Image (cartoon, rainbow, N blue to C red):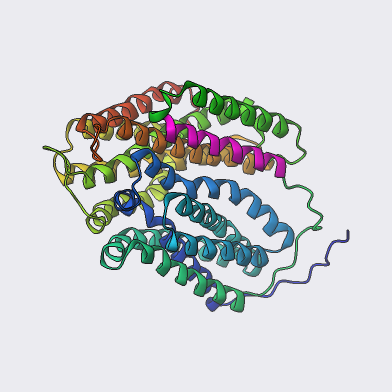
Amino acid sequence: MTTTSLAPPLRIGGAAVGALGALAVATGALESVVTPTLPLLQRELGMTPAEGALLSVTLLVTGALVTPVAGKLGDRYGGKQVLVRLMAVVCAGGLVSAVAPSLPVLLLGQVLQGAMVGALPLSFILVREHLPAGEAKVAIGVVSGLFVAGGMAGTVAAGPVAEGLSRHWMFALPTIAVTGATLLVNRLMPQDPPGRSADGAGTDWPGLLLLSGSLVTLMVVLAMAPGLGSQPLALGALLVLLGVFVTGWAAVERRAAAPMVDLRMLARPEVWKACVLTFVVCAGTAMAVHLIPQLLAASGDGYGFGAGATEIGFFLLPGAVAASLAGPLSGLGARRLGSRAVVATGIALMVTALFALSAAHFEVWHLVVGKVMISLANGLCVTALVAATATSVDRRDTGIATGLVLVTRVVGFAVGVQVSGAVLTAGTPAGSDVPAEPAFVTGFVTAAAVTALSLLVVRTMAKGAKA
C-alpha cells in the first residue's frame, strides 16, 4: 500500500472556522438535552430511575470509545473525511432519538449520537492542518468555547421545547442544526491529505470491541441491580460475562502493538493515582448530577419541588457556567500552588457540598448552590489531574497517560450515575414512581463518603510544579 504524497495544506479563512464553530454549538446542544429533561423522559417512557441513569450515560460511554479511534482515523485518512462521516452517524442518531417510541430505540439513538464526541478532536486536526500555530490556538479555543456555549444553550432550551412542542422536537431541532453545520463544513473546509498509509494498521479493533463489551455489560449490571437480587443466576451470569470481557480486554491490550489503552502505563504511581482519583471524583460528581434533577422533579411528602423540564434547565445552568470556569481556574491554581493543592481543594469542596445536600435539600437554592460547588470542584480536580499526569511522564507518553485518565473519567461518571439510579430505584416504594426522601439522602452521603476517602490518595501525590 503506498502512502499518498503530501501537498502543502490550503489556508482556511474565518468562514471555515465559523462552520466548525457552528458545528460545535449544534453538537453541544444535542449532547446536553437529556440531562434537564430526564425526569420528563422517565415519565413518558415509563422508565425506572436506574433505566434513566443508563440513558443519561449511553452517549458519553459511546463517545469515550469513539474518540481515540476517530483521532487515529483522522490522522490516517484526513480529518474532514472522517468528521463528515461521523456527523452523518450523529444525524442518524438524532433522527432515531427524535422518533423513538420506547427506551430501547432511544438508547440506540443515543449510541449513534455518541459519535459526536469525536468531533472536537477532529476539528482540532483540521485547524492545526490549515492554520499557523498561533492562529490555530485561537481557533481551537473558539471552537472549544462554542461547544460549551452550545451545551449551555441546550440545557436551557431543551425544557421549553419538550414541554411546548414535544420530547421529539428537542432532539429534532439540534439534529437539523447539526445537519446544516455539517453541510457547511463539507462545503467550506478544504480536503486535508492523509497523514499515513491507509492500511488499517495501528487501530486496536479487538481492544475496542472488548472494552465496549465490558462497559455495556457493567452498565447493564448496574441498571438491573435493584431487580437482580431475587435472580442470583441472572446476576451471576452477567458478572461472569463481565469478567470474561475485562480479562480478554486486559490480555489484548498487553499484547497489542498500538493498544487503545496502554495498561502498562498503570504501573507508574503518578498515573494510577491520577486514575483512582479521577474515577472517585467523577463517580461522586455523577451521583449528584443524577440526583439533583430527580429531586427537583420529585413531588413527595415534604420534599421535592415538582419542577418541570424548563425550570430544571434554568436551575442547572449556574452549574454549567461554573464547570466552564473551572478549567482556567484549575490551571492558574496549579501554576501557583501545585496540582496536589488544587486536587485537595476540589475534593474538600465536593465533600462539603455533598454532605450539605444530604442534610439540606429543602429549598431550590440549596440544590443550585450545591450543583455549582460540585461542578466547580469536578472541573478543578479533573483539569489538575490531567495536567499533572501530562507533565509527570515522558513527552512521548503524554497521549497514552492522559488517555487513561480520560477513559477513567468516563467510567467513573457512568458508574456514579448508574449507582445513583439503582439507589433511587431501590428506594422507590411499591406502587409509587417517586423515590422516598431517604433514597436521596443515601445517595448524597454515599457519594460524599467515597469521595472523602480519596483524600488518602491525595496525600501521596507529588505536589506538582509551581510557577
Q: Residue at x 26, y 33 (%)?
A: 428
Give the prevailing secondary structure in the magenta stretch: helix
Q: Which range is magenta?
A: 205-225
Q: Is residue 84 left or right of residue 360?
A: right
Q: Residue at x 41, y 23 (%)?
A: 229
Task: Point out the image quarter for the N terminus.
Answer: bottom right
Front in this rendered view, residue 300 or 79: 300
Q: Is residue 71 above or below residue 171?
A: above
Position of residue 370 measured from the top left corner of the image (x, y, whole percent): 25, 41
Position of residue 114 measured from the top left corner of the image (x, y, whole percent): 52, 53
Residue 216 magenta-highlighted: yes
Q: Is residue 82 left or right of residue 99?
A: right
Q: Is residue 197 above or below residue 277?
A: below
Name the quadrant containing residue 151: bottom left
Position of residue 129 measured from the top left corner of the image (x, y, whole percent): 66, 65
Position of residue 20 measured from the top left corner of the image (x, y, whole percent): 53, 69
For the image, the number of numbered tags is 0
Front in this rendered view, residue 439 or 262: 439
Q: Is residue 136 above or below residue 279?
A: below
Q: Is residue 135 above or below residue 300?
A: below
Q: Residue at x 39, y 56 (%)?
A: 32
